[in-house]
Image (tube, grey):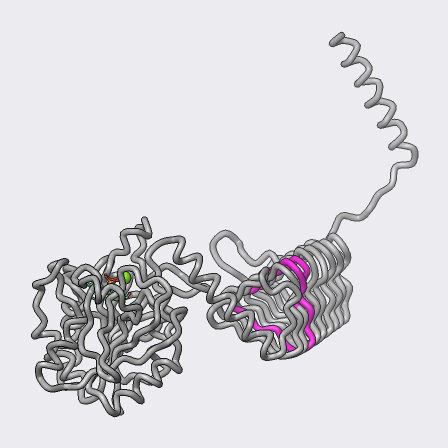
Amino acid sequence: MSLALIVLAAGKGTRMQSDLPKVLHQIAGAPMLHHALRTGGTLSPDRTVVVAGHEAEAVSHAARAFDDTAQVVLQPEQLGTAHAVAQAAPALDGHEGDALVLYGDTPFISPETLARMAEARQSHDIVILGFEATDPGRYGRLVMNCDTLEKIVEFKDAGVRERAITFCNSGVVMAATETLMSLVDAVGNDNASGEYYLTDIVEVARARGLSATAIACDEAETLGVNSRADLAVAEEVFQSAMRRAAMETGVTLTAPGTVFFAFDTVIGRDTIVEPHVVFGPGVSVETGAHIRAFSHLEGCHVSRGAVVGPYARLRPGTELAEDVRIGNFVEIKNATLDEGAKVNHLSYIGDASVGAAANIGAGTVTCNYDGVMKHRTEIGPRAFIGSDTMLVAPVRVGAGAMTASGSVITRDVAEDALAIGRARQVEKPGLARKMFEILKMKKRKRDGGEA
Ligand code: UD1
Ligand code: MG
């Protein structure tokens, strides 16, 4: 069946104390809005509508970055959750199918939970997602009668007996799009907050003879973010889940609590990740690789058997083939390293291709930037780049060629050639001793003069 996804993301998030709208704060390298869109995406919606208000332009930009077919509608004033859903009505005009409402600041609802909601929809007109709250606090309370959800009462409007209910509203709603839109239209704002409550659709629906139910999910899924402290908790929850999942699929994490993943990190089995490794977005690591301590990876692919670090930095566009070795204090950016290539110490390789089994000596730099433009360096297979070589791009080093240590290479080097780009060494016999004598004499003079 066709599904429309509506993500509410208009709120300011005052308690974040931020110029950035709340839903754009990140968890595991992705804005919370993307987490919500990704979860909703598991039900393959044919339309996605994001309701934006506060900093709408930035929210709209982020929504489109995730899904360029997403529609963004404006809720100029935040008059309540029902009012927010109503803003999506024109965008969903004529939509035949269901609508799922998610909050942009509630990133952990699981795909399994959404699938269970879709299942419950087969026998009820409205399905609400609830949870047993350890501390029900200010959540809306779900008033159940067996399977039937009679109504949702907001905390502010609840009496003592309703406040004692611990089954709470997560905010996630599923109903036929047409029904939902007609219900939110009928909701008023005569309540303690003067807001149009989405939760009121349940009573309106029941007055119309429609059926409503609530299904329960784990409380952890409903974790919402309202403050920086909540954001930190959400990050920790996400990281714990990623660490567990990585280990379950056969990845060794020597010190799991010190490894940080991005939302999309993929790591193959029998890969070892040592302590204090950070994965930014867009990293995939094949099986049997070894990521050593204190390395930082983003936007890169590491093949089978490669060893990275300790203290390595792989930046976006890095592609390491099988058995490549990247050692300490090496930075790689937008570069392809073919099978068995080695960059073991203190080097920068950017905008480059390095052939199979090439060896890059310590302190090598691809000088890729002239202050205005970026240029490429191409290093052939089996080339040997001597320590402290500056490769001034654009430049090519042929297969099997060698550069002498300390060279500044400004012109292409032919296959199998040795390029030396440094001043010839000269030797002055006895001059060092003379220099020392002169210098010591000067020092004595100076110190004596001062005293
Ligand atoms: C809402 C529910 C409450 C539930 C709780 C779960 C209502 C009336 N109450 O309360 O039952 O237990 O969530 O967290 O729905 N938003 C808009 N436009 C608006 C108002 C809100 O886009 O005009 C968005 C917010 O940005 C947020 C979400 O809707 O992402 C929820 O709004 P919020 O004000 O946090 O609702 P609660 O009072 O927490
Ligand atoms: Mg809230």
Q: Is residue 311 magenta?
A: yes
Q: Residue at 29%, 83% (x, y): give it.
A: 45
Name the quarter showing ligand 1. Answer: bottom left
Q: Is residue 151 rendered to the left or right of residue 273? A: left
Q: Is residue 423 above or below residue 394?
A: above
Percent position (x, y) of residue 165? 27, 68
The picture quadrant where one finds residue 146 is bottom left
The answer to whether residue 336 is left or right of residue 128 is right
Q: Quadrant of residue 210?
A: bottom left
Does residue 237 show up?
A: yes
Work out which quarter of the rendered image holds the N terminus and state it: bottom left
Direction from residue 214 to residue 278 in the image, left or right:
right
Residue 20 position, x and y percent, is 32, 54
| Residue closest to the eye, 108 or 343 | 108
- Name, please, the residue furthest toward the right: 430
Name the spot of residue 71 as percent of width and height, x first. 23, 74
Residue found 58% across the figure and 78% down from its top: 248
The vertical placement of 151 against 308, above or below, is below
Specify whether residue 222 is painted magenta. no
Q: Is residue 216 left or right of residue 123?
A: right
Quadrant where the image shows the C terminus: top right
The region drawn magenta spans 291-314
Picture mark count? 0
Determine the image quadrant of residue 267.
bottom right
Where residue 311 sits: x, y (%)?
65, 57
Q: Is residue 391 visible?
A: no
In this rendering, the answer to whether 336 lies above or below 98 is above
In this view, which residue lies farthest toward the front?
161
